[in-house]
Image (cartoon, grey):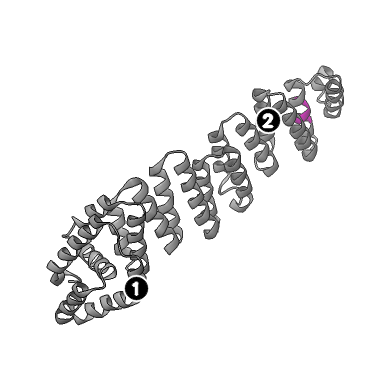
Amino acid sequence: MLEAIKKKDYEGIIKYGLELIKEGNLDEKIIINIISAYYRLGRLNDLFQMGRKVIDRFLKEKRYEEAEKIVKKLLEYQPMDIRILGLAVKVYAEKGEFDKAFLLLEEKIGIIPIVRLLPLFEKLADLSGRAYYYEKLAEKYLLAGDKNKAYNTFILASEMYDSEGNSERALNALFRAKDVKNTTEINKRIVNFIVLHSRDIVKIIDLLRERRDPDFWLYIFEIFKKEDKIDLLQSIINREDDPLVKEFFTFLTLLVYKNVYSEDLLEDIKRKDIEFYNVLSGYAQKYHTNAERKKLELEERNALLNQVFEKALESIEDIFK
């Protein structure tokens, strides 16, 4: 084989190399010589097939460093071959070096169409089983213009971050999904997550302000009740200088207390602001039956909402200024 190498007899290199392999001599230098010979002869499919078989064998035998050397040589000759990039992802995943695989694929964006790279990013995310790479996959879907997959994958990444105990990244992934598609579903997920994990009342108020929707507002209230987060509700009440907070809790008062007090409040509003009266009375009428079924049962909750009612009544002139 050395004589064939000196003479640059590429067919001879391949012939003698394959004979050595059949004899059980699976040495990385022999493999690289064969691969180089295939390249010189333009036999690119043979180059790939040879590399694939050897890499599979090395990985099976846990010869990870040798597998990496082979895949690097393949990439040296064929840096844009999707099949070889797939082998590289497999090798780095077996070594637990997911960042190397990700960076390799990242380098190809703009050179290879993103739609051709997507299956490899998907493969990397699946092999890693980690939220980070699913979040990165969602970014690639977005880059490819697939908003539905990006939206769903950001949500999946959030769930995985949550399972990994990373609440901050989980919430951030939900907001990234919201940036893709601002749906009622994602806003409900965000509120639910905040109430259960982060207790960030500023973010809750921002969502209230953004989605002035009675269905969404009622959902938020139901989450507070379901999860017994009255202390968090109290924290929001205390931000009484915010007109939106006053509006929200006046709305809740009308929903929960369909009685003489809320009727009196409606009459008071009607005298002062007919437009606002029409809005709130519409809320009350729409949810009257529903609210009656869902009256709070515990005495302390009733007391808390009485406080809400009083604050809303005291500040009614400031609402919707």
Q: Secondary structure at mark 1?
A: helix
Circle on res. 287: 1
Magenta segment range?
A: 33-37
User: On the picture, is 316 further left or further right than 122?
Assistant: left
The quarter of the image holding the N terminus is top right
Image quarter of the C terminus:
bottom left
Image x and y of residue 205, in percent: 28, 58
The answer to whether residue 124 is above or below residue 25 is below
Residue nearest the observer in this picture, 303 or 312 = 303
Dot 1 and dot 2 residues touching (CB under 8 Å) = no
> Is the stretch drawn in magenta largely helix, strand or loop?
helix
For image coordinates 19% across by 62% down, the residue present is 306
Query: Residue 132, percent across and down?
Result: 49, 41
Q: Tag 1: residue type?
A: Tyr
The answer to whether one can see residue 217 in this image is yes
Q: Is residue 2 above or below residue 245?
A: above
The answer to whether 28 appears left or right of 197 in the picture is right
* Vertical order, 29 against 129 (above or below): above
Q: How many marks?
A: 2
Q: Residues within 10 Å of mark 2 (few under 14, many from 20)?
A: some
At x 24% / y 57%, what residue is drawn?
Answer: 299
Residue 29 at x, y percent in the picture: 73, 21
Query: Badge 1: few (under 14), some or many (20 or more) residues near its Cα, within 10 Å?
Result: some
User: Looking at the picture, how far across and down is residue 201, in whole percent?
Assistant: 27, 52
Q: Closest to the observer: 51 or 284?
A: 284
Q: Mark 2 — residue?
A: 73
Q: Give the spatial CA distance, label 1 vs label 2.
A: 69 Å
Q: Secondary structure at mark 2?
A: helix
Which of labels 1 and 2 is toward the front? 1
Identify the amino acid type marked 2: Lys
Regarding residue 40, the answer to whether it shows in the image is no
Q: Earlier in the sequence, mark 1 or mark 2?
A: 2
